[in-house]
Amino acid sequence: MKKTVAALFGAGVVLFAGACGSSDGTASADETTTTTTTTSASSSAQGGAGVQLGNSYEDNCEALLPYLDELEGWGQDRVQAAQAVADAQQQLPQWQELDAGQQADTLRAIENAGKGEC
């Protein structure tokens, strides 16, 4: 059984993939894998970014769609992945620096990207 949870942090995407172990319900360290992939700040400056705090609704929604599409292609629930992204964004220190309108736009962009609607 494989679980993937996606969370976008600022300029990058972090994907955590954990593989569960054997059929008897036990897993050794060799049977469990965690993979982390991040995009660098330089690649985000070239348009490879995910959600960017303070960006417009349109920019954030459009930036998130390809990541959620890819997760959905892997058999993951895009709505749950979008909720994980929203939860992660709200934990960032920069979140408190946004005004209420920017916070609402960011959350709406993430939610709508989770629905595949921008």
Image (spheres, rainbow, N blue to C red):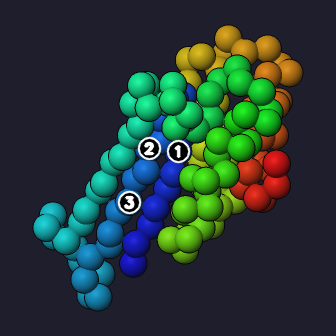
User: Can residue 43 be seen?
Assistant: yes
Q: Which residue is drawn at 52% across and 38% down?
A: 48
Q: To which residue does mark 3 refer?
A: 17
Q: In this view, does 116 lie to the left or right of 17?
A: right
Q: Above or below — where is 55 with respect to 66?
A: above
Name the residue type under label 2: Val
Name the residue type under label 3: Ala
* Residue 60 horizontal/vertical position (percent): 70, 36
Question: Are the residues tagged 1 and 3 within 8 Å (C-beta)?
Answer: no
Q: To which residue does mark 1 refer?
A: 7
Name the residue type under label 1: Ala
Q: Above or below — where is 69 with respect to 102?
A: below
Taking the view exactly as shown, the residue that stands out farthest to the front is 46
Q: Above or below — where is 22 with respect to 97?
A: below
Q: Is residue 28 left or right of residue 13?
A: left
Q: How far apart are marks 1 and 3 (CA)?
A: 11 Å
* Residue 33 horizontal/vertical position (percent): 25, 62
Taking the view exactly as shown, the residue that stands out farthest to the bottom is 23
Q: Above or below — where is 6 with respect to 48?
A: below
Q: To which residue does mark 2 refer?
A: 14
* Residue 31 horizontal/vertical position (percent): 19, 71
* Residue 28 horizontal/vertical position (percent): 16, 70
Taking the view exactly as shown, the residue that stands out farthest to the right is 101
